[in-house]
Image (tube, rainbow, N blue to C red):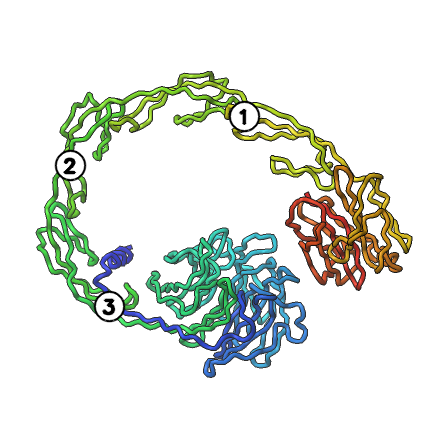
């Protein structure tokens, strides 16, 4: 505790300490491959490696090695080698033990969250699969090495749950062991690295960016919180260490601004200092590793994918500065300095000396010199206005009233003088009276009236009067006593019954779209302030649902026939061409020139609807057979669409508007069920399935 007080005092007189420091960032050869982010990085046998990640197009599984002497990147065997199909991923985790690197977890488009782990042999360049991670599949975790064990923890799982469990892996027995949970909150996108036989995890995102920092002792399986990083809280940063000096750099802050500042934590001295900024552009989700006396940082994202690569060298030089520090001190008190001594005016004005050792400030020694300027206390006298109804509370903690007189009263303010010494204040009071006012307001019975007193009044409360003291509102600065009376007004009401189309629903002023499944009403909506008297208008809606008669279309191999009711208008469309209108085809029958899928738009006096697409070709029976088991639900849908494809493979799903605009597309689907979110306006759409040259269209309604 004594050491901590001395250290804080040294910071408070920082102008006495001078130390120069240089942070050398050198740009090196760009990383091979497309610019990328969310990679993993590690060191093996004096070479650097960067693997996996996400570029502008896809997740990747490539591995690149960096030759420090040649400043050159080479392509190595990708993750999994020749059998690595489907192992592409980003936001994975890695650690290295001896001449082997261990890579696993992460996510990709095809496999959202992985559990697998792989080992890369530096000497053979081969990949081998090892025991799966025994925790939950996740991404954005951290990994590092202590001794002959790898450590993995934190991250986020497929359900969006932040994780704080912590594990180690022993390659000698190919097995995982769960340890004590990480000491901070569950989080993703933290920094995690080891140095000096300890593990370190800090920053990250637990719903908001964090700035806390933790040390892990493997011998005790114990976490200890260290001082928070002074820079902005962040996630997606990088970390590396040259024990006892640890570094955190880059990332994104709570405003999602990318950062380039660098912070150093000294484990021995337990403090942070800011270093020179990172040499490249601000970024997040870069990688970092250490080779010898240099750290290396590269790749990442800052609204662009990045492939630049930098080395970092940190040095510092200490310079002793013995310039005397002149401190004002009060004759009525004393001054306690960083040397632990308390000086009074009887000790003279100095100079006094103190040596700050290298373990107390950034590895630098400095000789401090103090001279004291002793100054006397000050005095002040004030005459203030006080309100008769409220009294006057003064700095002495007392409240005075007219019955106490007009003063004077005296009080000593510790450190209140301009020179920092005590000040004796004297108070006289001039008593003032409050003023009064009354108002009558018109108010709507359905809303009530919230007044300045914080209460909300309703017709059941009557018309008043009510009273309230408005503090300091009088022209003389005293309270104003307000009186309120209320005149209650009634809102108006209206009711409508509208015709609406069953297939498109009815969108009302309340912002909702109603469908036949919702019934015929009534529904209610309050239109704020719409009455002639300024009160709310209460609207009621009922709906008569109307459907276009008979959307059936038949196919006799030569003619498509619609059986829509008399008085309807017809328009045939080409389902295979984005539901485009076929010019001139406005009769109830249509003789297609080419094989394909067609539908008819029927319009009666109120509504318009579109039939299902029907295949016109000798293969129509085959199409129905292939797609006969497909199920699409729910339909109508509020946004989530499930397509049960059964045993179909290589399926594409496309959704078009009735005007032929493509609003959703997914290719090469090989799963039994495909689920997607259709974020579009309520209405009717055409869902097209295609596999092996066969297509089928389905009507899809959103609400």
Where does residue 223 sit, x and y in percent of width and height?
45, 58
Image quadrant occupied by the C terminus: top right
Q: Who's the residue at 64% across and 68% down the image?
A: 87
Q: How far apart, in angstroms, are the residues tagged by discs 1 and 3?
A: 79 Å
| Label 1 residue SS | loop
Quick check: can you spot residue 237?
A: yes
Q: Who's the residue at 50% across and 20% down the image?
A: 489
Q: Earlier in the sequence, mark 3 or mark 2?
A: 3
Q: Is residue 312 above or below residue 594?
A: below
Where does residue 74 sit, x and y in percent of width and height?
54, 80
| Label 2 residue SS | strand
> Label 3 belongs to which residue?
365
Q: How far apart, in angstroms, are the residues tagged by discs 1 and 2?
A: 60 Å
Instruction: Report the mark closest to the observer, 3 or 2.
Output: 2
Q: Nearer the viewer, residue 6 or 644?
A: 644
> Label 1 belongs to which residue?
531
Image quadrant occupied by the N terminus: bottom left
Q: Earlier in the sequence, mark 1 or mark 2?
A: 2
Name the residue furthest bottom. 70
Q: Who's the residue at 85% across and 46% down the image?
A: 588
Residue 645's image quarter?
bottom right
Side of 65 where 622 appears, left or right:
right
Q: Is residue 501 above or below residue 458?
A: below
Side of 87 where 386 appears, left or right:
left
| Label 3 residue SS | loop
């Amino acid at each position: 505790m004594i050491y901590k007080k001395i250290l804080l005092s040294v910071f408070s007189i920082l102008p006495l300490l001078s130390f120069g420091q240089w942070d050398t960032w050198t740009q090196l050869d760009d990383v091979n491959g497309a610019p990328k982010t969310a990679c993993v990085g590690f060191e093996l046998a004096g070479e650097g490696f960067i693997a996996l990640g996400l570029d502008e197009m896809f997740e990747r599984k490539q591995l690149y090695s960096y030759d420090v002497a040649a400043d050159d990147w080479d392509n190595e065997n990708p993750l999994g080698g020749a059998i690595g199909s489907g192992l592409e991923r980003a936001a994975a985790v890695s650690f290295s033990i001896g001449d082997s690197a261990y890579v696993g977890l992460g996510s990709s488009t095809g496999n959202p969250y992985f559990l697998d782990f792989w080992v890369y042999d530096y000497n053979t360049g081969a990949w081998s699969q090892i025991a799966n991670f025994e925790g939950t599949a996740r991404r954005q975790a951290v990994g590092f090495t202590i001794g002959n064990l790898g450590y993995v923890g934190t991250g986020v799982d497929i359900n969006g749950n932040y994780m704080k469990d912590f594990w180690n892996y022993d390659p000698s027995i190919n097995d995982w062991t769960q340890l004590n949970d990480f000491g901070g909150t569950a989080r993703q996108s933290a920094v995690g690295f080891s140095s000096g036989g300890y593990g370190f995890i800090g920053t990250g995102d637990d719903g908001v960016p964090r700035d806390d920092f933790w040390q892990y002792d493997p011998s005790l399986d114990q976490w200890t919180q260290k001082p928070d990083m002074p820079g902005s809280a962040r996630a997606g940063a990088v970390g590396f260490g040259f024990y006892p000096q640890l570094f955190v750099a880059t990332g994104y802050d709570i405003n999602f601004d990318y950062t380039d500042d660098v912070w150093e934590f000294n484990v021995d001295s337990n403090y942070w200092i800011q270093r020179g900024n990172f040499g490249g552009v601000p970024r997040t989700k870069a990688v970092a590793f250490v080779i010898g006396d240099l750290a290396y940082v590269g790749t990442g994202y800052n609204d662009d994918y990045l492939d630049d690569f930098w080395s970092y060298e940190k040095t510092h030089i200490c310079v002793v500065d013995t310039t005397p520090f002149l401190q004002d001190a009060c004759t009525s008190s004393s001054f306690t300095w960083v040397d632990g001594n308390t000086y009074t005016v009887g000790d003279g004005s100095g100079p006094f000396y103190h040596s700050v050792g290298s373990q107390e400030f950034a590895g630098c020694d400095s000789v401090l010199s103090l001279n004291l300027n002793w100054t006397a206390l000050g005095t002040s006298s004030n005459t203030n206005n006080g309100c008769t109804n409220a009294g006057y509370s003064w700095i002495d903690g007392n409240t005075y009233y007219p019955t106490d007189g007009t003063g004077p009263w005296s009080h000593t303010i510790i450190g209140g003088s301009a020179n920092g010494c005590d000040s004796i204040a004297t108070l006289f009071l001039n008593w003032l009276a409050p003023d009064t006012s009354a108002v009558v307001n018109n108010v709507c019975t359905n809303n009530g009236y919230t007044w300045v007193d914080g209460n909300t009044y309703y017709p059941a409360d009557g018309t008043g009067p009510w009273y309230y003291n408005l503090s300091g509102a009088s022209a003389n600065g005293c309270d104003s006593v307000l009186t309120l009376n209320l005149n209650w007004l009634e809102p108006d009401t209206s009711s409508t019954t509208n015709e609406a189309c069953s297939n498109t629903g009815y969108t009302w002023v309340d912002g909702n779209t109603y469908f036949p499944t919702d019934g015929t009403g009534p529904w209610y909506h309050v239109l704020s302030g719409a009455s002639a008297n300024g009160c709310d208008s209460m609207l009621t809606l009922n709906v008569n649902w109307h459907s276009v008669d008979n959307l059936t279309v038949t196919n006799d191999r030569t003619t498509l026939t619609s059986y829509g009711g008399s008085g309807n208008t017809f328009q045939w469309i080409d389902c295979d061409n984005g539901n485009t209108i076929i010019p001139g085809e406005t009769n109830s029958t249509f003789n297609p020139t080419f094989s394909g899928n067609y539908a008819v738009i029927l319009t009666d006096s109120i509504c318009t609807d579109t039939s299902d697409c029907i295949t016109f070709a000798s293969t129509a029976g085959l199409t129905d057979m292939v797609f006969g088991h497909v199920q699409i639900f729910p339909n109508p849908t509020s946004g989530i669409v499930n397509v049960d494809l059964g045993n179909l493979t290589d399926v594409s799903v496309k959704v078009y508007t009735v005007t032929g605009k493509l609003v959703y597309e997914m290719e090469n689907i090989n799963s039994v069920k495909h689920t997607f979110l259709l974020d579009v306006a309520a209405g009717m759409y055409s869902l097209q399935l295609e596999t092996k040259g066969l297509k089928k269209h389905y009507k899809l309604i959103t609400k």
